[in-house]
Image: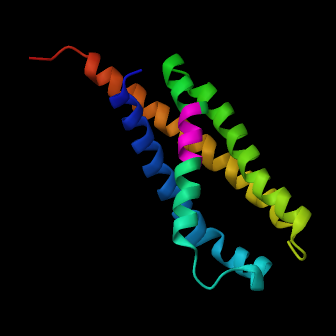
Amino acid sequence: MTAATRVRLLATAAALFVLLDLVWLTFVAADLYDRLLGDLLATQPNTPAAVAFYALFLLGLAHFVIEPAARQDSLRLAALNGSFFGLVTYATWDLTSLAVLAGFPWVLVPIDMAWGALLAGTVSTGTVAAHRELTRRRRRPAGP
């Protein structure tokens, strides 16, 4: 896999991830998080920490899930491994928080873990599907 292909995969995954997570955080989970986390939430997000999370999450997703699935041209592999990666990474936050933060709401744990699985599975599958389509178009002979 070329460096240019890796960059395209990462850029596609980043665009999908940011779009989907923004929709989730803005329209679906904002009230849920406010209600359940209350005083645990910062008044303003720590932007450098958020950027670091997004960058590391996407680099891991690309390395461990998207690139192998793209090499095998497998949407199934992208969906299954992406979902598992999202579940594990979001569980790391949720279960650690449940273990060490007084007042962390247990009811948020399965919701957030499910979102992580859905998000990473969708991003992985969408990225590999876009890569497949781009590769198919490049291989198609020029028409009259």
Residue 9, placed above or below residue 11: above
Residue 106, visible in the rendered structure: no
Q: Which residues are magenta?
A: 57-63
| Rendered image quadrant of residue 140 | top left
- Secondary structure mostly seen in magenta is helix
- Who's the residue at 43% across and 51% down the image? 15
Residue 106: x percent and y percent?
Answer: 89, 66
- Who's the residue at 89% across and 77% down the image? 103
Residue 118: x percent and y percent?
Answer: 66, 47
Q: Is residue 92 magenta?
A: no
Residue 100: x percent and y percent?
Answer: 89, 66
Residue 29, placed above or below residue 8: below
* 30 relative position to 142: left or right: right
User: Which of the image's four quarters has the C terminus?
Assistant: top left
| Rendered image quadrant of residue 138 | top left
Residue 31: x percent and y percent?
Answer: 68, 78
Q: Is residue 60 magenta?
A: yes
User: Which of the image's four quarters has the N terminus?
Assistant: top left
- Who's the residue at 38% across and 36% down the image? 7
- Who's the residue at 59% across and 64% down the image? 24
Residue 94, visible in the rendered structure: yes
Residue 81, placed above or below residue 56: above
Given residues 70 and 99, the one toward you in this image is 99
